Amino acid sequence: MRKLVIGAAAVATLLAAWFAPDQDGGVVGPAAATTREAAPAPVAPAIVAPPTDAIAPAAGADGIDLQIHPRVADDEMGNVFAKQSWAPETPKKIMMDQAQAQQAAQQASAPSGPPALPFQFMGRFTNEGKTAYFLQVDGQNVVARPGEKVNDSYLLDSVSGNTMNFVYLPLNQKQTLVVGDTN
């Protein structure tokens, strides 16, 4: 039953398209192929824009004076979706802005110390009384002994118990790396 209804609808659509009336109300038959040459395309008249400094009011069809303005660039138009409100800023927001400004001023005036140690302790090895320490720096394995330069910016100063003492060479400041218990 369903196939019959769909088939009847398809036939009715084809017949309606075949015998559809044209704009004059007559019935249009199938299109016939013709071998006419195409007419040359009409030439559109050139539109000359007035200079931007000589913009004058023009009278509209209803006698209304119209002002012609040059197009404004998109970046000069601003954000039309920006949040806008008539309500004054809340004191909480003003206080937060002031706190952020003070924090930025303190960070700018505070003396910068050495950066955090870039080392990760991997282990140690003792051979004939000399201990070598295995560190990982930026994904590379490094072997260090007390008194040696590590990573061109640090000097392994000393090792005592579970702490390694480094000197940050550019600022000559000491830093400590706690390594914990190792086997």
Image (tube, rainbow, N blue to C red):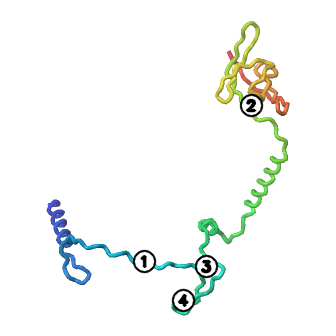
Q: Identity of the amino acid at label 3?
A: His
Of callouts 2 and 3, which one flags the residue occurring earlier in the amino acid sequence?
Answer: 3
Looking at the picture, does residue 12 appear above or below residue 164?
below
Q: Identity of the amino acid at label 2?
A: Leu
Of callouts 2 and 4, which one flags the residue occurring earlier in the amino acid sequence?
Answer: 4
**Residue drawn at 63 percent across, 82 percent down:** 55
Q: Residues within 10 Å of mark 4 (few under 14, many from 20)?
A: few
Q: Which mark is residue 69?
A: 3
Of callouts 2 and 1, which one flags the residue occurring earlier in the amino acid sequence?
Answer: 1
Q: Identity of the amino acid at label 1?
A: Val
Looking at the picture, does residue 178 appear above or below residue 78?
above
The residue where tag 1 is placed is 43
Q: Judge left or right: residue 130 versus residue 69.
A: right
Q: Secondary structure at mark 1?
A: loop
Residue 126 image point, x, y percent: 72, 11
Q: In whole angstroms, how far apart are the C-alphas of marks 1 and 4?
A: 27 Å
- Number of labels in the image equals 4
Residue 30 image point, x, y percent: 18, 72
Q: Residues within 10 Å of mark 1 (few under 14, many from 20)?
A: few
